[in-house]
Image (tube, grey):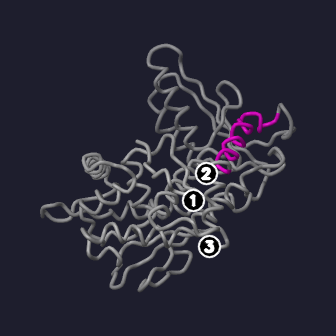
Amino acid sequence: MSVVVSPDDVGVPRAQAGPTPQHLLTTLLGEYLDSSDADLPSMAVVAILGEFGISESSARAALSRLTKRGLIAVRGSGRPPVYHLTPAAIARHRSRMDHFLSFGARRPQWTGEWVTVSFSVPQSGQGQAPRHAVRKALGSLGFARLYDSVWIRPGSDSGPVTRALHDVLDGVEGSRWSVTRARFEEEVGPHGPAAAYDLAGLAAAYEGFIARYSDLRVAVRNGEVDAARALVARTSVMDSWRKFPDIDPNLPEHLLPKPWPCQAARALMLEIHSALGSLAEARLVQVATPYWPDAASWITHFQASENGVSVPAAGDGRKRLPPTRAAARPPGHVS
């Protein structure tokens, strides 16, 4: 599903392959709603997704899927239905927003340690399915394949991968695996650990992000992006940025090509994301209020602080909480 943008939207790039309605709704709820007490009418959701060219039937299907996933729940038995975010979804959204907005703020302190995984799964029988499951689990945890069945990740925390391997391979007859912490004699060069990563491809992705949104940054600086355009543009920027914390291994600086474009891409993202936050929030309130009179009391937006940790912006009547608590509460909220 492509994000629909009017041709005269100055500085707002067209999305070539936009997010699905379900993915888009998850992004919007995570960015602009931060309380499980808020009652969200279904028609407000339909109107909000309509800003992105999503049809009513697709919007309602997205609501249904998120309900089945447990991210939102129906409040009461009235018609039309009213939804609310679950506490688990709120916690996940806050954690993910911190992850997205703080990523790249600084390189991690390097100890020289790598978590190394070696595994063997029998070729016969059901070996192919667990082998695929292991590779998928390792990839989701930020590991890269150094050799055929040797995977690595910078750092020393082996707990998550140990648990994942137990979950996947316990009970698979004939399978073996080991998790170790290692140091490389030669870190730099073609035989070092960085060779396991497609750093050229990752750099190209960062450069593509910069090229795609540079005109938008100029339009933002010139005050050429109004509230309606701000909502679509800000969402597009975040949706494009959010892949990087998941695919960038955050290697130490001495293993990266020079110049490394992560910082430039992050600076561009933060400038647009911060500058358009209030406008995007205002547009959401405007669109949702006809179907949700209390929208202005609940809708907020996340913004990154100077130290790289995200905190929700405090709107009118809201009290900003300390940065260690990534939350914004409407008046009268009771924890």
State the separation of the CA atoms marked 3 and 1. 13 Å
Q: Nearer the viewer, residue 23 or 290?
A: 290
Which residue in the structure is indicated by mark 2? 245
Badge 3 marks a residue whose secondary structure is: loop
Q: Residue at x 29, y 76 (%)?
A: 294
Q: Residue at x 67, y 48 (%)?
A: 211
Residue extending farthest left: 78
Mark 1 surroundings within 10 Å by alpha-carbon count, few (fewer than 14), some (14 through 19), many (20 or more): some
Mark 3 surroundings within 10 Å by alpha-carbon count, few (fewer than 14), some (14 through 19), many (20 or more): some
Badge 1 marks a residue whose secondary structure is: helix
Q: Quadrant of residue 49?
A: bottom left
Which residue in the structure is indicated by mark 3? 305
State the separation of the CA atoms marked 2 and 3. 18 Å
Q: Quadrant of residue 20?
A: top left
Which residue in the structure is indicated by mark 1? 99
The reply to whether callout 1 and callout 2 are in contact (CB within 8 Å) is: yes
Q: Nearer the viewer, residue 192 or 321?
A: 321
Q: Which residues are magenta?
A: 192-210
Q: Position of residue 126 (x, y in %)?
A: 44, 19
Residue extending farthest front: 8
Query: Counting residues from the N terminus, which is met first, the one under dot 3 or under dot 1?
Result: 1
Query: Counting residues from the N terminus, which is met first, the one under dot 2 or under dot 3?
Result: 2
Q: Which mark is residue 129?
A: none
Q: Amino acid at mark 1?
A: His
Q: Amino acid at mark 3?
A: Ser
Q: Position of residue 196 (x, y in %)?
A: 72, 34
Query: Counting residues from the N terminus, which is met first, the one under dot 1 or under dot 2?
Result: 1
Badge 2 marks a residue whose secondary structure is: helix
Q: Quadrant of the C terminus?
A: bottom left
Q: Quadrant of the N terminus?
A: top left
